[in-house]
Image (cartoon, rainbow, N blue to C red):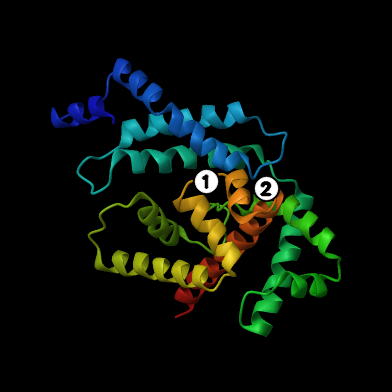
Amino acid sequence: MATALAKKFKEGTKKVDKRTKEKLIIEYSPLIKFIAQKIAVRLPSNIEFDDLVSSGVIGLMDAIDKYDPTRDNKFKTYAEFRIRGAILDELRAQDWVPRSVREKAKQLERAHVRLEQKLGRVPTEEEVTAELQIPKEEYYDLLNQVKSVSILSLDEAGSFNSSDRKSILNLLESCKIPSPISQLSIKGVKEVVTKAIESLPEKQRLVLSLYYYEDLNLKEIGEVLDVTESRVSQLHTQAIMWLRRKLKNHFENDRDE
């Protein structure tokens, strides 16, 4: 894949002509749509899918212009990161999450934090609903409302400084990192994420595995687990909220030491 791009780099230039760039955009258009669809399932219905795709195209063009073949990462990996980043940047610029939804997400997170500190583990749905003093149906509705906030946004994470974000970006881009300090930082992030996933309930772990590693969509995961697509979305939201908190705590503790 991207043989034209590889040939350009072998010729000793990182500049790609307009015709080659157009061919690459066509070649990678299925990847753009795939990433846009993965993000769209966690967004309100008023967000236009075509707008996500358009932003993804901009991300791919940026990847073509900035890709460095001397780094130890494949173009496809780099392109995926740039496409996803461009889509999320556009969503942030639109301020697409209402303030009321953000506040509900904060209330839900505070309830989870209180229970986690008290129990020393991931709280069950029954424990969360008891803490919030709401019926389970209302809790599920709350999860559905805040699912869009669960999309990991590095720029919006106030506890991440520029160094923290750079470390995660390097991890996501699979770049070669010459600095031993940077390598230790990335290793720490991997360990935090691994331990956080291991501590999740079985169904939430399975949802993450099927979604991110097997590339199944929510409907397909629902068929595997014999639950509704909405239920899969709720499990995904719960898992991502847990991982975000663990990463946030990790970086806050690092700065305190």
Q: Secondary structure at mark 2?
A: helix
Rendered view: 124 above or below 67:
below
Instruction: Give the amino acid type for the residue marked by disc 1 in the picture.
Output: Leu
Residue 248 at what x, y percent from top left?
A: 54, 67
**Number of numbered markers:** 2
Residue 15 location, quadrant:
top left
Rendered view: 28 above or below 140:
above
In this image, 86 relative to 224: left or right?
A: left
Residue at the spot x=39%, y=52% of the render? 172
Mark 2 crowd level (few <14, some 14–19, many ≥20, 10 Å Cα): some
Rendered view: 219 above or below 150:
above
Residue 141 seen in the figure: yes
Rendered view: 28 above or below 240:
above
Residue at the spot x=25%, y=54% of the render? 176
Residue 241 location, quadrant:
bottom right
The residue furthest top is 19
Mark 1 crowd level (few <14, some 14–19, many ≥20, 10 Å Cα): some
- The quarter of the rendered structure image containing the N terminus is top left
Residue 29 location, quadrant:
top left
Residue at the spot x=62%, y=49% of the render? 223
Q: Which residue is mark 2?
A: 229
Q: Which residue is mark 1?
A: 216
235, 111: nearer the viewer: 235
Residue 106 at what x, y percent from top left?
A: 72, 62
Q: Earlier in the sequence, mark 2 or mark 1?
A: 1
In this image, 108 relative to 161: left or right?
A: right
Q: Secondary structure at mark 1?
A: loop
Residue 97 at what x, y percent from top left?
A: 70, 45
Instruction: Give the amino acid type for the residue marked by disc 2 in the picture.
Output: Glu
The reply to whether discs 2 and 1 touch (Cβ–Cβ < 8 Å) is: no
State how far apart marks 2 and 1 are (Cα): 12 Å
